[in-house]
Image: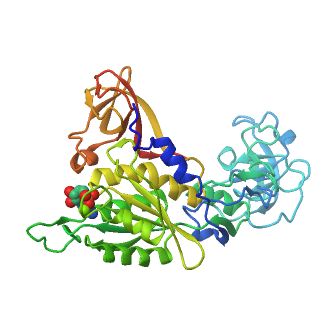
Amino acid sequence: MSTPDLLPLEEARARILEDVLPLRAGAMPLAESLGRVLAEDAIALLTLPPWDNSAMDGFAVRSEDVVGASPETPVMLAVVGEVAAGHEPEVGMGERQAVRVLTGGMMPPGADAVVRVEDTDAPEGVAELPQTVAVRAAVGPNKDVRAAGSDMHQGDHLLDAGTRISPAALAVLAAAGHAQVDVHRVPRVGVIATGDELTPLGEPLGPASIPDSNSESIAAQITAAGGEPVRLGIAVDDRDIVRERLLEGILDCDVLVVTGGVSVGAHDLVKEVFTEIGSLDLWRVAIQPGKPLAYGSAPRPDGGYCLLFGLPGNPVSSFVTFELFVRPVIRRLRGEPGDQGRLVVRATLADPVRKSAARRAFVRVKLEAVESGLEARLAGGQSSHVLSSLALADGLAVIKEGPAEVPAGTEVEVIRLDVEVA
Ligand code: AMP
Ligand code: MG
């Protein structure tokens, strides 16, 4: 079932990813690191909590003093001091004594439990310290005491290298004492749209022109994949202009994505330009849509390399080939584990699909939960220029190379476009 000049998807992806290594790492302030990827395992620099402290506003007691305490049989204790969060206890506690504690306050020496203020006769929210307190509930040892080290111990492993810094990861890193973190650099990814017919958004359309939608979708896909898009505008179908724009782009980009001009038409000059400024390493993959995908690289004056992607111009083809090939490269450069970083689910086709037998098809589907699991229904027309169905789709159903007619009821995998996984 293979066509000799079309590369199978896995082979193309493996050849592209073979040489892609995470970008260099460096320290940066934690406060700026949201969304970056840890370059090293993160360990706890502190023990947290650093000392036993109170989980409640209330009174630190010796649990043995309040055995049997209840509303009917309260136990009276002498109040000998107070500990608020951020202050060291000034007193210890002896028999039948209590110390008022506020949430986060250190446990005073001698106390082993906390009675909540609600379980005493002390008025809530009153600054003045009472001389005595009636305890109306018994508490066992350690009740409402947050033990030293119950969150983390100094030296504990917290997060693996490759973790994307989420708000929650940021919280644990801050708590563990990291003001700086070692993270990978974010790749800069240039976007160039080619075609005489293209008009930038917001400019009046000529009689034979259409809006340049690829620059918008590709820039958004770059951002969503965690890269930094660099918009390089539209290049008309002229070899010198396309070459100039690419040469400009490679100067400060890690990756360049060019859309259009990669098939076999008279104006399809992108592959030639790749060869002129560097190399064309592969072209044409056995997928539908997106067959004419081109990939290469070009040396940069600084001694590095810029990876070059030529995506087919049809808007759905450029979207799908970005998803399958460029997204994994951006993730790899960012230091993330895994390739595509998408949730893949199993579903049953609710509609029949017609496709090219020799190619793997990526079909725009809407997912619906039914009793037996998930059902995948065509989101609309499947031609590679039809963006309206792409916008309605929850995912891409993957239909393997094989028969051209795939009946309804076939089990397929669906790449969820709306769910990101590590
Ligand atoms: P090409 O790959 O250059 O032959 O283009 C294939 C189809 O995609 C043509 O119908 C183009 O008009 C369309 N196309 C190419 N580039 C873009 C773009 N940037 N935005 C929208 N449509 C495009
Ligand atoms: Mg074109």
Q: Nearer the viewer, residue 125 or 225?
A: 225
Q: Quadrant of ligand 2?
A: bottom left
Q: Position of residue 65 (x, y in %)?
A: 86, 41
What colouring method underlies this structural image?
Answer: rainbow
Q: Is residue 418 visible?
A: yes
Q: Position of residue 285 (x, y in %)?
A: 40, 46
Residue for point 58% across, 72% down = 304
Q: Which quarter of the picture shows residue 333? A: bottom right
Q: Position of residue 56 (x, y in %)?
A: 69, 51
Above or below, 351 relative to 201: above
Residue for point 40% across, 44% down = 5
Above or below, 224 relative to 415: below
Quarter that holds the N terminus: top left
Residue for point 69% across, 52% down = 159
Q: Position of residue 379 (x, y in %)?
A: 25, 39
Determine whether, in the image, residue 35 is placed left or right of residue 24. left
Q: Residue furthest left?
A: 207
Residue for point 35% across, 65% down = 270
Q: Is residue 340 visible?
A: no
